[in-house]
Image: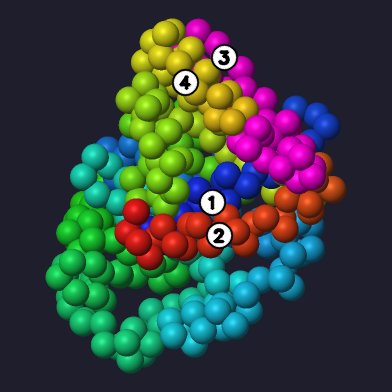
Amino acid sequence: MRTLLAIVLTCAALGAASCGSRPEVGVQVDPGLQRLVPPDAVVLAGVDLEKLEKSPLYRRYEGQLDQAKLDAVTERFGIDPRRDVTAVLITANAKQRIALARGRFTQQQLEPKFQSLRMRRTTYRGHTLFGDAQNSLTFAAKDVIAAGSTKAVRDLVDRMEKGHGGIPEGLRTRLAALPKDDTVWVVSDDGLPLTGVPLRQDVQSALSNIEGLVSGVTAGAAVDNGVRFQADFDCISIEAAQRVHDALRGGIGLARLTTNDNALDMLRLYDSIKISKGDKQVHVRADLSSDLTDKVWAHVPQLMQHAHQALQNGE
């Protein structure tokens, strides 16, 4: 669960491609996953892996992926992330999170793998669950895996049996405001969606200063040749928006000041981030060219290493 959410938000932080004209709006969530969202969800985060893998950016760097680790995942779980998973959706309400993955796989194909890993097999309301008393996964449809705490998975089965589910109106409104071509996105009606996200201690500390000032988030990134990222933070008051605006600008400024003068690519990256303010909103925009994205890519392994270490340390 935490790994999937980390992947989603790491991708969102990297951003996406530039576009000359105003993009069409309205992110479309996979219909097969929409109906599995709890009606009281307050956070949604998604990745359209099929669209991502077709992008020129992905194709340029596909050969630099850690093929050995991906092969190990395929061998262990029977799913090849490079080919078999088409969409990921993380959903959370006030009490629990659940991860949904749609792809080119079936229960019959994966069951033997799960059993070989000694995952306990149980049945709940006619659905087979694999896992233990704390965490489980199940097939919510023939090509959809749902994973989370065992209680969250059972609650999902209950909703499916009753026909309850679907994206609530507040989150639908946020999705409708995002560019249609966004590949990675996160929307929240419950402040900053930071639970379970691996962050460096200094970053976590800085964000904690504004966390209570933000009531909602609408953020997305579109991946093509380069990078385009946008985020809108709804704040609890005009004064709160000013504090969030100043904190974000201060953070970027500090990052720039502590970057070596010869690290021109990172300086260009910081300069590309534009922060502005409305009455109760703070807007963040970043538009990276293909050339700058290629330069910044060299720093991605270090960013991923920080994320991996945070996950290992349970931060």
Q: Quadrant of residue 299?
A: bottom right
Circle 3: residue type:
Lys
Mark in front: 3 vs 4: 4
Location of residue 180 in the rendering, given as x and y in whole percent from the top left corner: 64, 38
- Which x, y percent locates residue 217? 45, 30
Between residues 34 and 308, which one lies in front from this camera angle? 308
Question: What's the distance in space between the residues labelled 1 and 4, CA to CA?
Answer: 21 Å
> How much space separates mark 3 and mark 4, taking CA atoms?
9 Å
The residue singled out by tag 4 in the image is 244
Q: Is residue 239 left or right of residue 296?
A: left
Say whether residue 125 is left or right of residue 160.
Answer: left
Q: Secondary structure at mark 1?
A: helix
Q: Looking at numbered disc 4 in the image, what kind of residue is underneath it?
A: Val
Which residue: 55% across, 72% down?
Answer: 81
Report the front residue among 262 and 284. 262
Q: Which residues are magenta?
A: 255-283
Question: x and y percent of residue 21 in the render?
Answer: 80, 29
Q: Counting residues from the N terminus, which is met first, the one under dot 2 or under dot 3?
A: 3
Badges 1 and 2: C-beta atoms under 8 Å apart?
Answer: yes
Determine which residue is flagged by label 1.
10
Dot 2: element: helix
Query: Does 17 appear above or below 297?
Result: above
Earlier in the chain: of badge 3 and badge 4, it is 4
Q: Amino acid at mark 1?
A: Thr
Location of mark 3 (residue): 277
**In 3D space, how far apart are the residues under numbered discs 1 and 2 (Cα atoms)?**
8 Å
